[in-house]
Image (cartoon, rainbow, N blue to C red):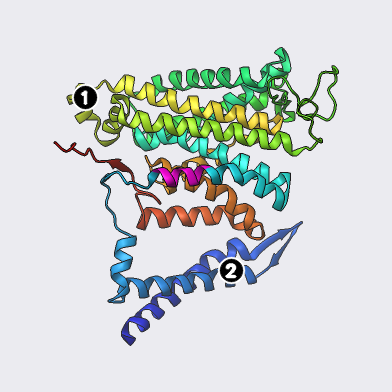
């Protein structure tokens, strides 16, 4: 037994030294004006953390009793798990529904409107993750420019508000349809591309959209951005007083005015669209279109041999994913009441892709969990905001090594033969 700890200690010390040599210049040297200041506390803490983590992992891997649990956690089974229907699923779904309904009121009581804003952005990222999951997780097409469809939806609402006084409810289907059209036309030049080449083309498409929005100042106002019309509840504004003397939301329902009404309304709108999107995806998985996406992901040659047209399959995947991305863009614009190109950089595409990979490609439940974690945890750990992207990178590497299937494996219900 001591030999295990000696081996783990040697390996962990070596990893700690390497981490210090690598992270020392990156985190210890800080540029202050024209001078470089040396702060060795950060690399020391990071290298100590790496040493401790490495020691724990080596003990888990080599320990005769703990290694069995480690193998279960890090199993690399790429197959789809077939499960039998459970009797208590309805009760669990009802509890989840009650939790989702009570969440905004609990957050408002704890941290006010800021908490509601965090929840709204979490739901928007859930929606974006579900949209990208169609392209990457179900169809197996690596898309690094998904933020372009997000931007198309947001700017459809913003430009419509600026030039045509477009309302929120009319902008929702319009922005989603225009984003789906962009996804349809993007799919044509990449029909014969795979892997890295497809990723590069989609990355370029996302950057082209961002640069057009940033430089076409006469139309989009460039970096200054555009103001967006505020959402209404059947024509009732969430304002203290209406400019045209029509009753506002709180006046119509005889409530005292509160700025939280608009946030709570936007939360439930986003929750409704997330719920409808999950229902749609679960139905598509069982339909021939969803089966065709999965066949394309596994092997395109075998897909052709089965009589499935890969052209229409790719076009449908890009269009459906872009449709959901455009919907998320309209919701984002309606929540922020303002959009500018800085909200649609490559880092947004990277975060959405990280949500899909960490949650489990093709797993709806895993993507919901990963999206909530990616948006809620950084707010809870704001003291470590400087290491946010560093943490994301470590999580991606660890997931690829030990949990390539993501947090939640893809499951499929078994068909139970009825008793005769």
* Residue at 33%, 19% in the rendered image: 312
Instruction: Confirm whether residue 149 shows in the render.
Output: no
Spatial CA distance of label 1 from label 2 is 53 Å
- The quadrant holding residue 305 is top left
The kind of secondary structure element at disc 2 is: helix
- The quadrant holding residue 61 is bottom left
Which circle marks residue 59 in the picture? none
- The disc, 1 or 2, on the residue closer to the chain's N-terminal end is 2
Residues 371 and 387: in front is: 371
Q: Which residues are magenta?
A: 90-97
Q: Which residue is mark 2?
A: 43
Q: Quadrant of the N terminus?
A: bottom left
Label count reads 2
* Residue at 52%, 70% in the rendered image: 49
The residue carrying pointer 2 sits among few (fewer than 14), some (14 to 19) or many (20 or more) residues within 10 Å by Cα, namely many
Q: Which residue is mark 1?
A: 304
Residue 52 image point, x, y percent: 48, 74
The kind of secondary structure element at disc 1 is: helix
């Amino acid at each position: 037994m001591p030999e295990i700890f000696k081996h783990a200690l040697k390996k962990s010390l070596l990893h700690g030294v390497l981490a210090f040599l690598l992270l020392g210049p990156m985190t210890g040297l800080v540029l202050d004006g024209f001078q470089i200041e040396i702060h060795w506390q950060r690399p020391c803490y990071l290298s100590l953390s790496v040493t401790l983590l490495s020691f724990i992992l080596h003990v888990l891997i080599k320990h005769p009793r703990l290694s069995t649990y480690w193998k279960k956690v890090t199993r690399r089974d790429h197959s789809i798990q077939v499960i039998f229907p459970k009797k208590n699923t309805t009760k669990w779904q009802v509890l989840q529904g009650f939790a989702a309904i009570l969440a905004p009121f609990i957050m408002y009581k704890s941290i006010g409107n800021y908490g509601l804003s965090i929840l709204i952005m979490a739901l928007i990222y859930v929606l974006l993750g579900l949209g990208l999951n169609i392209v990457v997780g179900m169809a197996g097409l690596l898309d690094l420019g998904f933020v372009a469809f997000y931007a198309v939806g947001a700017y459809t609402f913003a430009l419509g508000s600026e030039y045509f006084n477009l309302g929120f409810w009319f902008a929702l289907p319009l922005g989603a349809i225009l984003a789906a059209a962009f996804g349809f036309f993007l799919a044509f030049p990449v029909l014969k591309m795979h892997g890295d080449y497809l990723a590069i083309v989609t990355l370029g498409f996302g950057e082209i959209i961002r640069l057009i929005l940033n430089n076409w100042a006469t139309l989009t106002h460039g970096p200054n951005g555009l103001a967006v019309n505020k959402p209404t509840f059947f024509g009732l504004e969430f304002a203290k007083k209406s400019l045209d003397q029509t009753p506002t939301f709180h006046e119509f329902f005889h409530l005292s005015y509160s700025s939280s009404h608009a946030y709570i309304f936007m939360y439930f709108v986003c929750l409704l669209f997330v719920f409808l999107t999950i229902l749609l995806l679960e139905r598509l998985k069982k339909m021939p279109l969803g089966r065709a996406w999965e066949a394309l992901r596994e092997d395109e040659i075998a897909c052709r041999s089965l009589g499935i047209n890969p052209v229409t399959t790719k076009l449908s995947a890009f269009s459906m994913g872009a449709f959901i991305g455009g919907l998320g863009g309209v919701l984002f614009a309606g929540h922020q009441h303002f959009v500018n190109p800085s909200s649609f950089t490559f880092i947004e595409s990277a975060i959405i892709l990280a949500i899909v990979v960490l949650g489990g490609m093709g797993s709806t439940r895993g993507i919901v969990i990963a999206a909530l974690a990616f948006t809620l945890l950084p707010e809870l750990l704001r003291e470590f905001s400087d290491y946010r992207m560093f943490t994301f990178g470590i999580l991606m590497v660890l997931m690829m090594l030990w949990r390539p299937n993501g947090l939640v494996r893809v499951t499929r219900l078994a068909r139970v033969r009825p008793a005769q």
